[in-house]
Image: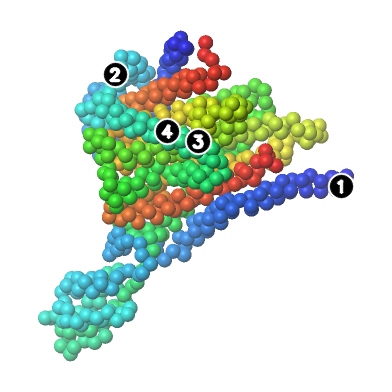
């Protein structure tokens, strides 16, 4: 098992390398530069800026330079957030995004799983239909509609919770963003679990367990759920990577200092180092969660073996 | 022989679509969605034409007025406004009365009043057709009448005083247009690519699908942002590009269908009769892949509309004075304390549209699903 994990981690290095290379050249071929302003800068100023940030060197030299720095863990300085290095920006924003993301992920897993199981157990009853309706609602309503409505209802009209801001991470400030992040995921997980649970409840091993006279709760939790959560696990792998690296919409609406906005603002302002830093972080998360999904698969499904 | 053979396959193929239609008709959610969608399309095409307000017209007197069924200006707002206008015209107000739709003003001045003073009233959006009915002999007192222009803002107005209903209608048009455009691009590329790869098979197929796999691996949002960076704010061009990204799933679906169709008797028969590859693809393969393709298209349209709204929400979409549901929602989210209706109506419009498209897609999938037949 350990050897498998190590091999996968080593195998991730070429993947990351390819992603970094692709992203580096793609963002560079985009027209414009980081110092393009409404009012053009003096040529000498521009020249100096380019020299300081080594933008005057040939592209391949910049690329090698960047790779070398990256290997040493140096993401470089940010072009638009003056006085900050990309590493500082990420270190400040990532804990916020990860806290919110992991809470949302936990909510999605627990609530979605619970709703899905209940719906499957009472298939075609009003409970089932209520869960399906909620899930359809959660999947269809986009998060940039849901988030402001939540802020409006619970933050402004009812004044139960703060409508925005981070405030050092007090729990009250986290409730609404976590709900807005989690609800679409809850909906998808509930639908996936419901579907696979209905199938699992009809499976032979579950029927056998029932024939032995085991209580329903035990049959569901220990026998059916194990195979039923496989699709949800493979869905939640990439979803977790996306949740933990922040959502620009949620951060913008609730005014949170996460890292979701860095990618878009970085790309639009040609802040090359910031874009690259975000891409690297996202790629690492994706690779990591794909690995976790595969390990979980082996743990859940005895037919899957990694030797 | 052709005459005898023709009705056979024709009735069969007609019954396939007829069965699907019958099944769809029994699905109440899908039928309601179909009506809603029809309404949206009509609203998108004709709504901006018959709307009493233009989406770009600015009503300076009515900035951020709440949605209401009764007409603006409110009676209690007319008199202060008239007083303001008169003070700007340097007239002393002696008597003012509102009689239905006409405003009657008696005003005086220390000097002789120029008859052109009515223009002050006309210049305000509230009043029109101002006229002097009586003038005192020395010309220092006048009685003026003006019609009060009554306007309805069913959805209220935005932060610049533009009618939100007209803006919602125009953005529905934009959303539907972009959804149709990007989906059409994806449809054409995906079907042609997938059918070619599936029909030719072998090494070409492997090569073509490997290319699709590579494109799949690119992070989608990165790609979209890059497209924005490349094409700037040219929305049409951008959505052709988005369509050119979204064709991957379509190509996979069509390829899978084509591989199973390629071995069917009617394709072999056409091949044996000497029909070329292009002819077989056009006449036999592509028409038979339409079922799943239609389902996928109805699910792709909401995806594209959502993507457009998302980009507009971030401020990367259409340009003023044109607007889109994403822009309206983002403006509403900024102003939700003072003007919650600005968030509410565009959100509702987008959500209903997405619901209708999703339900219709689900209904079509159930209706066309060969598994249940």
Q: Position of residue B34 (x, y in %)?
A: 57, 53
Judge whether A293 appears above or below A168 on screen: above
Pointer 3 or 2: first along the chain? 2
Which is in the foreground here, disc 4 or disc 1?
4
Dots 4, 2 in contact, CB < 8 A: no
Q: Chain of mark 1?
A: B
Q: Residues within 10 Å of mark 2 (few under 14, many from 20)?
A: some
Residue B273 falls in image quadrant = top right
Dots 3, 2 in contact, CB < 8 A: no
Residue tagged 4: A110
Which is in the foreground here, disc 3 or disc 2?
3
Q: Toward the viewer: B263 or A274?
A: B263
Q: Position of residue B217 (x, y in %)?
A: 49, 26
Per the model, the C-alpha gap separating discs 3 and 1 is 56 Å
Q: Residue furthest left?
A: B110
Same-chain status of marks 3 and 4: yes
Per the model, the C-alpha gap separating discs 4 and 1 is 63 Å
Judge whether B136 appears above or below B56 on screen: below
Q: Residues within 10 Å of mark 1 (few under 14, many from 20)?
A: few
Dots 4, 1 in contact, CB < 8 A: no
Per the model, the C-alpha gap separating discs 3 and 4 is 11 Å
Residue A272 seen in the figure: no
Dots 3, 4 in contact, CB < 8 A: no
Per the rendering, the mark at residue B4 is 1
What is the quadrant of the C terminus of chain B in the image? Answer: top right
Residue tagged 3: A117
Q: Residue furthest front?
A: A213
- Helix, strand or loop at label 2? It is loop
Same-chain status of marks 3 and 1: no
Q: Chain of mark 2?
A: A
Residue tagged 2: A74
- Helix, strand or loop at label 4? It is helix
């Amino acid at each position: 098992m350990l050897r498998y994990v190590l091999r996968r981690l080593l195998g991730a290095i070429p993947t990351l390398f390819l992603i970094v290379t692709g992203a580096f050249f793609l963002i560079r071929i985009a027209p414009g530069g980081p110092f393009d302003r409404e009012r053009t800068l003096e040529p000498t100023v521009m020249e100096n800026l380019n020299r300081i940030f080594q933008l005057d060197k040939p592209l391949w030299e910049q690329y090698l330079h960047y790779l070398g720095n990256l290997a040493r863990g140096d993401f470089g300085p940010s072009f638009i957030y003056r006085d900050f290095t990309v590493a500082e920006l990420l270190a400040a924003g990532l804990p916020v995004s990860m806290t919110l993301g992991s809470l949302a992920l936990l909510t999605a897993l627990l609530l979605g799983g619970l709703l899905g199981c209940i719906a499957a157990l009472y298939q075609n009853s009003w409970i089932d239909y209520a869960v399906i309706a909620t899930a359809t609602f959660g999947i269809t309503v986009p998060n940039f509609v849901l988030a402001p409505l939540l802020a409006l209802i619970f933050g402004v009209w009812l004044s139960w919770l703060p409508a925005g801001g981070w405030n050092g991470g007090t729990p009250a400030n986290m409730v609404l963003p976590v709900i807005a992040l989690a609800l679409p995921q809850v909906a998808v997980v509930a639908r996936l679990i419901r579907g696979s649970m209905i199938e699992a409840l009809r499976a032979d091993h579950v029927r056998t367990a029932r024939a032995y006279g085991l209580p329903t709760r035990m049959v569901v939790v220990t026998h059916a759920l194990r195979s039923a959560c496989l699709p949800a696990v493979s869905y939640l792998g990439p979803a977790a990577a996306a949740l933990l690296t922040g959502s620009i919409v949620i951060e913008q609406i609730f005014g949170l200092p996460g890292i979701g906005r860095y990618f878009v603002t970085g790309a639009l302002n040609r802040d090359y180092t910031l874009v690259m830093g975000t891409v690297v972080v996202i790629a690492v998360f994706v690779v990591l969660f794909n690995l976790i999904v595969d390990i979980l698969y082996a743990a859940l499904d005895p037919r899957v073996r990694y030797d | 022989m052709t005459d005898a053979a023709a009705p056979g396959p024709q009735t069969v193929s007609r019954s396939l679509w007829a069965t699907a239609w019958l099944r769809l008709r029994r699905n109440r959610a899908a039928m309601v969605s179909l009506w809603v969608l029809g309404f949206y399309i009509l609203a998108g095409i004709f709504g901006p034409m018959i709307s009493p307000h233009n989406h770009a017209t600015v009503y300076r007197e009515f900035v951020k007025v709440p949605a209401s069924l009764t007409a603006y200006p409110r009676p209690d707002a007319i008199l202060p406004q008239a007083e303001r206008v008169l003070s700007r015209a340097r007239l002393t107000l002696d008597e003012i009365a509102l009689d239905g739709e006409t405003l009657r003003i008696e005003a005086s001045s220390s000097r002789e009043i120029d008859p052109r003073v009515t223009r002050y009233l006309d210049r305000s959006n509230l009043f029109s057709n101002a006229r002097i009915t009586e003038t005192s002999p020395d010309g220092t007192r006048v009685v003026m009448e003006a019609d009060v222009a009554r306007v309805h803002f069913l959805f209220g107005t935005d932060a610049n005083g533009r009618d939100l209903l007209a803006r919602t209608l125009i953005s529905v048009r934009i959303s539907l247009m972009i959804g149709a455009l990007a989906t059409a691009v994806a449809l054409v590329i995906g079907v042609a690519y997938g059918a070619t790869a599936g029909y030719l098979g072998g090494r070409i197929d492997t090569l073509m699908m490997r290319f699709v796999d590579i494109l799949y691996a690119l992070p989608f949002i990165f790609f979209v942002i890059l497209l924005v960076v490349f094409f700037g704010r040219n929305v049409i061009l951008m959505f052709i590009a988005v369509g050119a990204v979204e064709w991957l799933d379509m190509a996979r679906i069509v390829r899978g269908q084509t591989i199973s169709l390629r071995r069917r008797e009617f394709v072999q028969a056409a091949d044996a009769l000497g029909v070329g590859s292009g002819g077989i693809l056009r006449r036999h393969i592509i028409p038979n892949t339409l079922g799943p393709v239609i389902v996928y298209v109805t699910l792709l349209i909401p995806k594209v509309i959502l993507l457009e709204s998302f980009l507009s929400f971030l401020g990367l979409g259409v340009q003023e004075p044109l607007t889109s549901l994403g822009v309206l929602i983002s403006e509403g989210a900024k102003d939700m304390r003072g003007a919650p209706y600005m968030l509410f109506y565009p959100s509702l419009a987008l959500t209903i549209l997405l619901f209708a498209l999703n339900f219709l897609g689900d209904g079509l999938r159930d209706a066309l699903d060969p598994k249940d037949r």
